[in-house]
Every structure is written in C-alpha cells, then in structure tokens.
Image (cartoon, grey):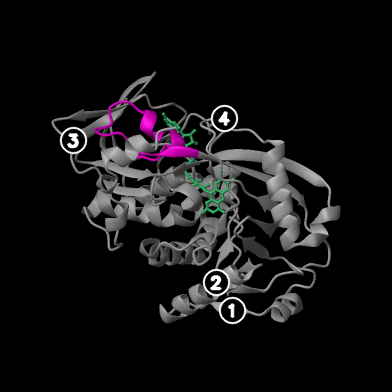
Amino acid sequence: MDAVDVAIVGGGAVGAACARAAAARGLQVAVFEPGPDPAAASPASAGLLAAQIEPTDDALLALSVRARDLYEPLAPALAETTGIDIGFWRAGIASFAFDDAAVDRLKEGAGRQRQAGLRCDWLEGDEVWERWPGAAPDCRGALFAPEDGAVDPQALTRACLADARRLGAALRVEQVATIETVNGRASGVVTRAGKTPAAHVVLAAGVWAPQIAGLPRPLPVEPVRGQMAATAWPAGTPAAVFYHDRGYVLSRGGDALLGSTMEHAGFECRVTNEGLAQIFRGAVRLLPALLNQAVQRMWAGLRPVTPDGRPIVGPDPDVERLWYAAGHGRSGILLAALTGEIIADLVTKGETDVDISALRVDRLKPQAMNSHKP
Ligand SMILES: Cc1cc2nc3c(=O)[nH]c(=O)nc-3n(C[C@H](O)[C@H](O)[C@H](O)COP(=O)(O)OP(=O)(O)OC[C@H]3O[C@@H](n4cnc5c(N)ncnc54)[C@H](O)[C@@H]3O)c2cc1C
C-alpha cells in the first residue's frame, strides 16, 4: 500500500475531524473506517454543544467553550465546501433546577461562569415560563447558557469526511488490526488488505480503541451505553434545548430528541424498556406537552468513557508519532473539531496552543485502568 503522512484509525466524528484538519494542512491522509459500527457513538449522539451545562470539570470548561466556539466558523465553511449543513444551532441551553440543592448548585455555577467571563444567566421560574410557555411547570429556575447549542452529529461526521476527501484524504473501508511501531516510533497500520506505512498514526476508534493490537499501553476506555428516542416536537413550543440531571430534550428539524441513559452494559448496544422509561420520564418533566406526541424511533450507542471522564488527546510518551484522539465520553461531538485542530497541529508542528496537560494518556495510572475494567 502507498505510504501516507497520517493514518487515522476510526472515522467517527473525532476521526473525521482529525482527517479534515490534517488534510487542510496539506498532509496525505488515509482514514480507516470499516463501518461505522452499529454501536458507534457519533451517529447515536444528540449533538449537544453543552460546554457550560454538563457537570463542570474546571480543567475542561475553557477547553469546551473554545471547542464550541469553533463551530461558529466551521459550520458555514463546511456548508460552502461540501454543501452539507451540519445543523449548527446556537440559541442556548437551559438547565432546570427542581429542588433546593439544584437551585444552589446551578446558581453558584452561573456565578462562577460569569466570573470566568462567560455569558451565563440564572432565570427564575416565571422567567422560564415566559420564555418557554409550557416548559417544566414545577421547576424552581434554570441556568441558561445563551451561547451553547447543538449540531447534527451525523451531518458533522459526513461533512468532515467529505471535506477531508476534497482535500485529498483517502477513505479506506478497512478495519485496522494492528498499529505497527519500529524503534519506538509508529510506522503504519495493518489491515486484512496488508500494511499501510504511515509517518504518523492517530487512534480515534471510539470504544474499540483499546482492542487494537500493537498499542504500547492498556487504554482505560470503556463503553457507556446511551439510549435515545425521537418524537415530534410539540407545536407551539419554540425550538429549544432543555436539560436536567436526569435527561434532556432538544428540537431538531421538527423532531424532539430525548436522551439519555448512562449504562455500564459492556458492548451490548440495545434499547431497553427501562432505559426508555427513564428517558421519557425525564423528558416529560422538562416539557409535559411531549406526553401526547407519537414515538417515532429509538436507538442506542456506546460512549467511549475514561475513568476521570476526560478524553485522551495527545502524544504517546513512549512511542513517537502515535497520537491519541480517544475516550471523549459524553462530549465527543462538542470536542471533535477542537480535537482535530490539536492533532493536526501536533502532527505538523509538534505543539499546540491548547493546554492539553489534563488530557495526557499517562495521567491514567495502570491501577486505575484495571479497576475500571468491565
Ligand atoms: C446516546 C448518546 C448521546 C450523546 N450525546 C452527546 C452530546 O449531546 N454531545 C456530545 O458532545 N457528545 C455526545 N455523545 C458522545 C459522543 O457521541 C462521543 O463522544 C463521540 O461520538 C465519540 O466519537 P468517536 O469518533 O471517538 O467514536 P465513534 O463515533 O464511536 O467512532 C469510532 C469509529 O471507529 C471505528 N472503528 C472501530 N474499530 C476500528 C478499527 N479497528 N479500525 C478502524 N476503525 C475502527 C468504528 O466503526 C467507529 O465508526 C453522545 C453519545 C451517545 C451514545
């Protein structure tokens, strides 16, 4: 096989974004993607850009906000070069409080975010009902992050892959069995069709990343199942994204997407009555008008989750030119575009202006890895 500059293992949202960013820097890229696997995370995702909403890990907040803001220029750029609309929507996410503890936590969170220079509001209950009539009638208020939003994850992946190909990247419909290294340096990938020599290898294989042979260390990435369902969005309610600690609902193209569960069920990717019950209970509490809507479809996917919930992005400390773009957990769509930029900068310049010290692979010690095996 012809040698490439960069072999990317996995063509989900993260691999696709890495491919696009690397190809945009003039590198010869090959993306290896046999599927997508029916259990893959990206096609199943809700696509929330919930940088200021998801439980805040201070190490991730600045990174997440920067990642979210990248979609503002990326969405029109991809529309222009590929004709694909990635559904970028930025009218804010409201996180509702239903008890005193949540009021305290969210108010404090909103204050902390404002101190950090971010736009973030606390809405009292009557402000919530005025803005979104019919929403969460028993809520006690909401944190509102006006710059958060959503993208359509399937369109995002498709658009990044299409743009990467336009820029010269090859899409290889093959499963990588082994990452090869020679003298402490990544040298290529092996599939059933043979070896493709590569100057750099990027591992972006979602929950399957740890299974690839030739890795210099065990990767503590585990599948956490998320179930979702779709109904029609109730007429008369303005398009919105509502969130609370037991679920969320977002409008996309006339549908209401209801999510999601966090289940340790190994690689079993299926929809269950229990999961659906949890999703529907959570969503109906946020928007009771959903009760009368017909269920249209339901699905599940496996999030690649690390023990501390942060992704693994950056170099392997022992094997040169092996780069990780893995373990993005609940936020892989939010972080995909930024991950692509980081990896492309590392590959071309050996450095990135993003602080990725909290994302290093060797922060995860072997004991922690073993204790989290399924
Ligand atoms: C229900 C649900 C809701 C979610 N909601 C959100 C959200 O609102 N916002 C957000 O930011 N994130 C969300 N996420 C998380 C997000 O979807 C993931 O973090 C992200 O999609 C991970 O992308 P990935 O490319 O790493 O993995 P994947 O999308 O799983 O892609 C990995 C790819 O690697 C391929 N592959 C596997 N093995 C090999 C191999 N040996 N060789 C080559 N290719 C291989 C697979 O076929 C697959 O296509 C959600 C996830 C789920 C499941």
Nearer to us: label 2 or label 4:
2
Q: Secondary structure at mark 4?
A: loop
Q: Is mark 4 within 8 Å of ligand 1?
A: no
Task: Measure the alpha-carbon separation of dots 3 and 1.
Answer: 51 Å
- Residue 302: x and y in percent read 53, 39
Q: Is residue 290 above or below residue 35?
A: below
What whole-number distance in Å separates the C-alpha atoms at marks 3 and 2?
A: 47 Å
Task: Check contact, mark 4 vs mark 3: CB within 8 A.
Answer: no
Amino acid on which the number 4 mark rests in the picture: Glu
**Labels 2 & 1 near each other (Cβ < 8 A):** yes
Q: Secondary structure at mark 1?
A: strand
Q: CA distance from mark 2 to mark 4?
A: 34 Å
Assign the N terminus to one quadrant of the image.
Answer: top left
Q: Which residue is mark 2?
A: 106
**Residue 369 placed where, x, y %?**
33, 38
- Which labelled disc corresponds to residue 122? 1
Range covered by the magenta-colored residues: 202-223
